[in-house]
Structures are given as structure tokens and as C-alpha cells.
Image (cartoon, rainbow, N blue to C red):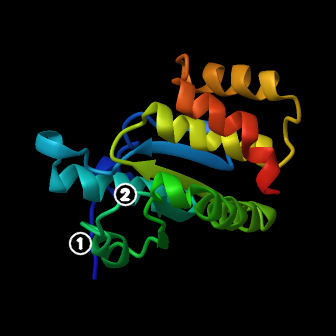
Amino acid sequence: MPPKLRGKWALGITPRNLTWIIKDKLAICERPGGFGVNHRRVRRQEEIIWLRENDFACVISIIGAPHNLHNYDELNMPYKHRPLATYDDIDNWLRVFYSDIHEMLKTNSKVIVHAEEVSDRLVGLMGGYIRWSGLVDDTQQAVMLTERIGGRQLDPDSRELILRVHELR
């Protein structure tokens, strides 16, 4: 049973680098609690509480290792573990990953995806979803929109994913 919190802690804290890909529907963030030497157990709990209290229906972790996934169970936060595939297997992984997100969003669920950090790869994956789902059909518009949302110019691999992902529909 999760600990009972009072006051401002009962609402948790916003995950670091939370970025809305589709406003109030699909977001990305850094791994709850941080990663590497910056990881803090208490912060992880507070961020998971924030996700739960802000009506996120599911957290999708694309981190390879299952570390700390039990915390979602302990704090009654639904999650899916979808470890990012290797380059050779990426197309099949993307089909399943994008279909999962699409099905959840069709039910008006709020979804958040996290990797260790908000990297070009994570932002590019979400740009790929924007294109794959048909929200933006034009390739260059999808890249520009993704870069604007992510606040950065994407690396060539992320741009390439956005350019070709429509072939996976």
C-alpha cells in the first residue's frame, strides 16, 4: 500500500522535462526519479504520484532494463514496459509501439512515454507517431513540428525515422 501523503506532497511533483506531444493526451518525460547518479527514490515516488493524480492512464517505459517498474505497481500507476528494439528490429517494434499508443488515445486516455532522458531519439519517436498516425502527413512539416515541440534540431537518425515511418502504417 502506498504511503499516505499530506499537503503539497499528496499531489506529487511534475516529472522533469515533461513535454506535451499532443496537448493533454500524449507526453514524454525523463525517467521518473532521474537517471544515473541523479536518480532519487523519493523524487521517483513524487513524480509517479503526480502522474497518477493528473489522470495519466498509462506510463510507457522504453528503457531496456525493468529497474524500478515495481514502483508503478506500488503506487497504483498502470504501465507498459516496451524496451526499445535494436536497429535491426525497429520497424516491428514501432508498429506495436505506435499501435499501443493509438489504441490508448482512442479511449481518451492520457499517456506518457519515458526513456532515461528526453533525447533526440525519444523526441524523434514521438515525431514518428505524429506522422504515423496521420496527424501531419507532410514529411517536412512533421519534422519541423517535432523540432518545435522538442525545442531542438533533431539528429539525422531521428529525422530519418520521421521521414519513413508512414511506410509502417
Residue 151 image-quadrant placement: top right
Give the left or right position of residue 5, taking residue 135 as reference: left
Q: Give the Cα separation between the discs numbered 1 and 2.
A: 26 Å
Question: What element does badge 1 sit on?
Answer: loop
Quarter of the image for the C terminus: give it.
bottom right
Tell me residue 147's x, y (percent): 62, 22
Task: Tell which of 138 and 70 is nearer to you.
Answer: 138
- Disc 1 marks which amino acid? Pro
Q: Which residue is mark 2?
A: 63
Q: Is residue 167 visible?
A: yes
**Residue 138, numbered label:** none
Q: Is residue 142 left or right of residue 57?
A: right
For image coordinates 27% across by 70% down, the residue present is 4
The residue at the point 52 percent across, 44 percent down is 28
Task: Using the image, determine if residue 66 lies above or below residue 142.
Answer: below
Which residue is at the front of the view, 121 or 10?
Answer: 121
Could you say where residue 2 lies in the image, as x and y percent from the top left? 28, 75
SS of the residue at dot 2?
loop
Q: Position of residue 167 (x, y in %)?
A: 81, 50
Vertical relation: 117 (above or below) 159: below
- Badge 2 density bin: few <14, some 14–19, many ≥20, Cα 10 Å: some
Q: In which quadrant of the rendered image does the N terminus lie?
A: bottom left
Task: Please state which amino acid type lies under the numbered disc 2.
Answer: Ile
Indicate left or right for 138 with 143 as reference: right
Q: Nearer the viewer, mark 1 or mark 2?
A: 2
Q: What label does residue 3 carry, if any?
A: 1
Q: Which of 69/74 is in front?
A: 69
